[in-house]
Image: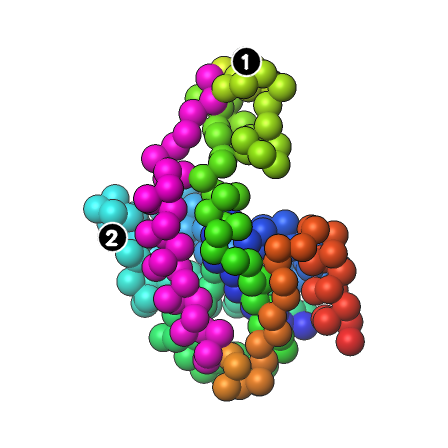
Amino acid sequence: MNVILLGLPGAGKGTQAKSITDHLHVPHISTGDLFRKALKDQTELGLLAKEYMSKGELVPDAVTIGLALQRLNHTDSDRGFLLDGFPRNVVQADALEQYLKSQARHVDHVIYVEVDESILLDRLTGRRVCSGCGASFHMIHNPSAVIDRCDSCNGMLIHREDDQEATVKERLRINKELTDSLTEYYTVKALLRTIDGSQDISVVSKEILDLLTN
């Protein structure tokens, strides 16, 4: 089964991706992981991506598409895959469709984990990270035992710039524009299924697995 997982930052895609791949026994293909591996291995595409990322620029579609399609060529995705973070826009979605068509394959389901932006803002701005060991906490949902101190190493918990409200709002705005274009794209193709991601994690997982099973 070939599945695409959509959702804004903070929607819990990572958690749901693990649940889906454990159930379907297919690889979880995440663009974040692809970029990290390509950079580590210093591949041609990885070095190209690094060139843009080091300047704070978006990686061009051609590079992202190249990395994703290379990964889809691996034999472990022959029986199916879960894509997370790709496609990111309609250009990438078209490229994926053409690639799969050339392989006599297609996307079976596109799952959109939808969460109200006020909830996402709460989830993302409440995050605190240990300056010592990198452990992650949340002021409301996963607080440390001692305020501003890490449970593991007693290091100072910091509020990263990426998690500041103004930064988070801008990130959500950009991602929403891209995600909206994809939800429209896959709605037209009758592939989109929307799940309420504000529910308990186990409920969201069950609804997704029920959808895929039925």
Please give the residue where the numbered disc 1 appears in the rendered image.
154
Disc 2 is placed on an element classified as: loop
- Viewer-side residue, 38 vs 199: 199
Q: Quadrant of residue 62?
A: bottom left
Please give the residue where the numbered disc 2 appears in the rendered image.
57
Q: CA distance from mark 1 to mark 2?
A: 36 Å
Count of numbered marks: 2
Give the percent coordinates (x, y) of residue 156: 46, 17
Quadrant of the frame with the C terminus: bottom right
Residue 50 in sight in this render: yes
Residue drawn where x is 41% and y is 63% of the image: 176
What amino acid is labelled 1 in the image?
Answer: Asn
- Viewer-side residue, 28 vs 114: 114
Identify the magenta region: 156-185
Give the percent coordinates (x, y) of residue 201: 69, 51
Q: Earlier in the sequence, mark 1 or mark 2?
A: 2
Q: Nearer the viewer, mark 1 or mark 2?
A: 1
Please tell me whether residue 214 is drawn above or below residue 165 in the rendered image.
below
Please tell me whether residue 53 is drawn above or below residue 205 in the rendered image.
above
Q: Quadrant of residue 29?
A: bottom right
What amino acid is labelled 2 in the image?
Answer: Glu
Give the percent coordinates (x, y) of residue 45: 34, 56
Residue drawn where x is 58% and y is 51% of the image: 12
